[in-house]
Image: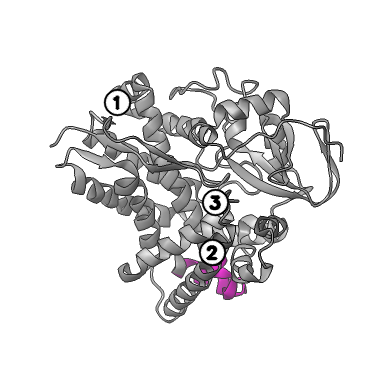
């Protein structure tokens, strides 16, 4: 392995947790294909390398080696249920298995289904803002970004209201370990993820059985029919459901406060959007680029390969820095500036290649409706200076806030 001795960049330092982009810039300039001894994997920070890696068939999406490495001295048997659930996810598969599963999963995202969800998204957004508008203050995270995508996905799945809280808690526990967490409590996170995998799978199996007896119009009904028509094993359907839930819930949960934070940090951009609401689609793409809610994805080298001037051995884990790539000055002019009119804006937030985000149309619809509704109903939105924001970044895969307090005029 041709690895030179370099400084150990601490991606989990307090400074990097709050704002990782200066560190990404340092890494990109000094060591764009970097091996972290502490983390045990390679990190890519250049746009051209990350984009190429996302399309590279020599890199596998099957991350079982990474999950096992995360455990350290913890018994691998402690996450067998987690591995069974997540490693059957489409996002963890390579072609041709991925191709077959992707075609099948598209049956849950038909144009007719997407349009039927528009009213669910609007009604849920309004209902959540109704609860806070008379107060004059809210926490963007707890009052909006956590419940909104969770309620929407639960409605789309057709999960009974009595089980929706459990569904989201299980998804969070699974997603936390799946997101390559840092810290010393990896055994606790692993056990919680494994228990949640059992409970989540049991719920989805119950819903599948109900939909087979009495099909409805929800996504699980659509996917159950598609699986049976194509002769696929329904035992693999919970894996697709956890993928849709985590992709549609966790990333959207983070993108909403990340986007609000960017707009309030750059008030001239907020005023520009308020003056011209037709800029919402362009603004959304810039939010995704500027503060990517999923700053890293992982791949495993299926063979020895060279990236940049580094030789990477077969079996190595590689962190593809989407967030770092989205701030690469070689690709983006004024890359560290938030500009809602940026064009072109070829960010990597949805991941090009065969693993391009399955729910991208739903995600964009949800975010456009959410931001349009928020800015229309709360036009004087501003930071609550009495309550500091609390960034959350316990893993390399998810980046957002635990709390983002704001104020506005009461209606």
- Image mark for residue 274: 1
From this view, report whether residue 26 is shown above or below residue 43: above
Residue picked out by circle 2: 193
74 lies left or right of 111: right
Judging from the image, what secondary structure is the residue with disc 3 in?
A: loop
- In this figure, what is the number of numbered marks? 3
The quadrant of the picture occupied by the C terminus is: top left
The x, y position of residue 124, in whole percent, is 28, 52
Region rendered in magenta? 221-239
Q: Mark 3, residues whose alpha carbon is within 10 Å: few (<14), some, or many (≥20)?
A: many
User: Is any part of residue 318 visible from this angle?
Assistant: yes
Judging from the image, what secondary structure is the residue with disc 2 in?
A: helix
Do callouts 2 and 3 mark residues in contact (Cβ within 8 Å)?
no
The image quadrant of residue 178 is bottom right
N-terminal of the pair, mark 3 or mark 1, is 1
Judging from the image, what secondary structure is the residue with disc 1 in?
A: helix
The image quadrant of residue 219 is bottom left
The x, y position of residue 263, in whole percent, is 37, 28
Question: Could you tell me what secondary structure mostly forms the magenta stretch?
Answer: helix
The x, y position of residue 248, in whole percent, is 46, 52
**Residue for point 31% across, 54% down:** 120
The x, y position of residue 156, in whole percent, is 39, 61
Residue in the foreground of this view, choosing between 38 and 223? 38
The quadrant of the picture occupied by the N terminus is: top right
Q: Is residue 233 magenta?
A: yes
């Amino acid at each position: 392995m041709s690895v030179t001795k370099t400084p150990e960049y601490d991606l989990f330092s307090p400074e990097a947790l709050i704002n990782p982009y200066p560190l990404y810039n340092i890494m990109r300039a000094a060591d764009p294909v970097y091996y972290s001894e502490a983390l045990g994997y390679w990190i890519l920070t250049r746009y051209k390398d990350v984009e190429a890696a996302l399309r590279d068939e020599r890199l596998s999406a099957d991350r079982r080696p990474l999950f096992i490495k995360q455990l350290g001295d913890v018994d691998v048997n402690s996450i067998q249920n987690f591995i069974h659930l997540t490693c059957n996810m489409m996002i963890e598969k390579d072609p041709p298995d991925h191709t077959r599963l992707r075609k099948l999963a598209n049956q849950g995202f038909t144009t007719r289904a997407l349009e039927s969800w528009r009213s669910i998204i609007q009604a849920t957004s309004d209902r959540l803002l109704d609860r806070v508008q008379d107060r004059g203050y809210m926490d963007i995270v707890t009052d909006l970004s956590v419940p909104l995508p969770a309620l929407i996905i639960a409605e789309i799945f057709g999960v009974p209201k009595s089980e929706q809280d459990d569904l989201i808690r299980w998804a969070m526990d699974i997603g936390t370990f799946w997101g390559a967490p840092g810290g010393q409590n990896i055994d606790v996170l692993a056990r919680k993820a494994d228990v949640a995998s059992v409970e989540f799978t049991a719920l989805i199996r119950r819903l599948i059985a109900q939909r087979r007896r009495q099909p409805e119009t929800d996504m699980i009904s659509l996917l159950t029919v598609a699986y049976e028509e194509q002769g696929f094993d329904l035992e693999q359907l919970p894996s697709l459901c956890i993928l849709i839930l985590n992709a549609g819930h966790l990333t959207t949960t983070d993108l909403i406060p990340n986007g609000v934070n960017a707009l309030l940090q750059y008030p001239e951009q907020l005023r520009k959007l308020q003056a011209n609401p037709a800029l919402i689609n362009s603004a959304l793409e810039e939010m995704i680029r500027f503060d990517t809610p999923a700053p890293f994805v992982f791949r495993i080298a299926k063979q020895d390969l060279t990236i940049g001037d580094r030789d990477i051995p077969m079996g190595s884990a590689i962190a593809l820095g989407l967030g770092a790539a989205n701030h690469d000055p070689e690709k983006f002019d004024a890359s560290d500036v938030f500009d809602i009119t940026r064009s072109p804006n070829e960010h990597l937030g949805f991941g090009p290649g065969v693993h391009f985000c399955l729910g991208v149309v739903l995600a964009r619809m949800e975010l456009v409706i959410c931001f349009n509704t928020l800015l229309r109903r709360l036009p004087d939105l501003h930071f609550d200076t009495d309550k500091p924001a609390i960034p959350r970044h316990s893993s390399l895969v998810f980046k957002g806030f635990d709390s983002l307090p704001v104020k506005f005029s009461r209606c």
